Image (cartoon, helix red, strand yellow):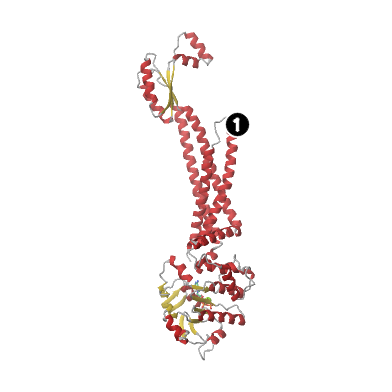
Amino acid sequence: MAVAERPEVAMQLNLRPVISFHGVSKVYPTGTVALRDVELAVLQGDFCFLVGASGAGKSTLVRLLIREEVASTGRIFVDGQEITRMARRRLPKLRRKFGIVFQDYKLLSKRTVAQNVAFALQVTRPGQRHLREKVEEVLWIVGLEDKVDKYPDELSGGEQQRVAIARALVHRPRIFVADEPTGNLDPDTSWGIVQLLLQINHRGTTVLMATHNREVVDLVRRRVIAIEGGRVIRDEAQGSYLRPGEATL
Amino acid sequence: MRRILAALWFSIKSAGQNFRRNLGVSLAGVFTMGLILFLVGGALLFTHSVNSILQAQQANASKIKIYLSDSASLASIADFQTRLQHDPRVISVSFESKDQAAKEASQDPDIQQALSTLGSNPLPASLNLDIKQLTDLARFDQMAKSTPIADKTTATDYNPDVINKLHTVINIIEVVGGVIALILFVISLVIIMNTIRTAVYARRTEIEIMKLVGATDWFVRWPFILEGIIGGVLAAVFSGGVVFAGYHVFVQAAQRSLLSLPFDGSYTVTLLILLVVGGVCVGALGSYMGVRRFLSV
Ligand SMILES: Nc1ncnc2c1ncn2[C@@H]1O[C@H](COP(=O)(O)OP(=O)(O)OP(=O)(O)O)[C@@H](O)[C@H]1O
Ligand SMILES: [Mg+2]
């Protein structure tokens, strides 16, 4: 476990789970059971990989976290608050705790790169000072400083992905959740992004990253939560993409 | 305070941007709204004009002559006149003597002939009343009939037929005008809501994304509502212009055909304010309802 490597951090943070799932299942209206009886606790400052084959339920788990979807059974706590029965008007506050990179990016097609990133700041903290500087800084971090005034349609898939990452980072969220943030990136850029996430994790941000990127998971050696058919089948502190001896997922 | 101002500024900016980006749909919305405001404004002005013509007629019609018996004493006539003058339903009362009646009547050559053949003056003296309300005429007719000083055979010149007809016409026009305005209002709300919903539908993903990033309902809603208000004001100004140009032409045509229809400036201003307020309300309300179903993310 990430904090386990740094006991002094764990002490400071009191080992309070930021996210916990208790017996959570999700059945979509179509009848598909996407998650079954999930038990999970993510501590403040953790760095977790979420791995599993396509259709395993990773994105569903992310959607439940921000109440984009509601769990069918079970309870989910974020920051000590039960969210499955949270009133609709309190959702904005819940969502602002997160920085989320959606698998399909969810960029506003009619706004420029800078406006897309600035948007997350305007939503979370209207009246933010030095908006432009903050946006440019984060775009520089993801290596898009020369695409500031482009529209999403004018960017490559990987560039769009990096805009999504910048938008999720710009308001310095407590919890960073990324659904396949490196799916469209070359190995070098992917590695750069992962380094960046390790860095923000080092500063105390909880990071949850769903990924198919085997090299990254095996190199970083952090907590790995493996999902198969909607069930958590493995949860290891310093795991690898595959269980030793396992050929495929 | 800074936050509120910033949020407001953000709303205004996005409203403006959205308006320009979706110019086609926006203009379609403004056009529909303008068209309906034009119809509402036109209907109201038309009703108002017809009403003011009829009211002028009504003013003429609300006159009644109470014929006085030749045997009535001057004192009792004066007494009756004072009583009428103090009646709140009466605008004015004037006394017309037998001679004056004869002089008035003799403007018609036939009657003059008849009068001079008779030698004596058969025309009665009268009290000429100007009444505020057409509907009160019948009461004054009744009152005259029960007064001893009034002429026994014909107490007044009251003719219920003409009065009733005029009254019916005025009532019908008021009701029809009201019904038309109401129907137009309902139609406009439905059309505008659907126009806005179409406009919003094109932006549903945008709304969804905003909500998922943590925007509140009002943060998403404000730009749309402002946009609706801008559209409403534009529509009101354009339709107002057209309605008043039309009104001007109508008044001139009416005056050429000798109908007593003055250009009613104060009503014009009231109506313009009404159109703007209506446009703002319908635009804001339509946006509010149009956005609502897409906010449930
Ligand atoms: N909106 C939906 N309605 C119905 N079924 C859905 C919906 N979204 C996902 N599913 C189903 O739920 C299951 C889990 O989907 P999910 O998107 O969570 O998988 P995933 O692990 O993210 O896959 P991938 O790695 O391909 O992104 C799949 O069987 C999928 O078909
Ligand atoms: Mg997925």
| Residue in front for this viewpoint, A121 or B54 | A121
- Percent across and percent down for residue B31 are 58, 51
Residue at 50% from the left image edge and 76% from the top image edge: A176
Q: Is A83 rendered above or below residue B6? A: below
Query: Going by the picture, which residue comes out furthest to the bottom?
Result: A245
Q: Examine the image and state in which quarter residue B9 appears.
A: bottom right
Asked whether, in this view, residue B38 is left or right of residue A66, the answer is: right
Q: Which residue is mark 1?
A: B256
Q: Is B9 rendered above or below residue A26? A: above
Residue at 39% from the left image edge and 29% from the top image edge: B88
**Residue A31 seen:** no
At numbered mark 1, what does the secondary structure look like: helix, strand or loop?
helix
Asked whether, in this view, residue A165 is left or right of residue B141, the answer is: right
**Cβ at disc 1 under 8 Å from ligand 1:** no
Could you tell me the amino acid type at mark 1?
Answer: Arg
Residue at 44% from the left image edge and 74% from the top image edge: A26
**Residue B232 seen:** yes
- Percent across and percent down for residue B135 are 42, 31
- Percent across and percent down for residue A220 are 54, 85
| Residue in front for this viewpoint, A44 or B5 | B5
The chain ID associated with circle 1 is B
Asked whether, in this view, residue A75 is left or right of residue B34, the answer is: left
Q: Is A173 rendered above or below residue B32? A: below
| Residue in front for this viewpoint, B219 or B37 | B219
- Percent across and percent down for residue B59 are 48, 29
Asked whether, in this view, residue A76 is left or right of residue B226, the answer is: left
| Residue in front for this viewpoint, B125 or A162 | A162
Residue neighbourhood size for the residue with mark 1, other residues' Cα within 10 Å, grouped as few (<14), some (14–19), many (≥20): few
Residue at 59% from the left image edge and 44% from the top image edge: B242
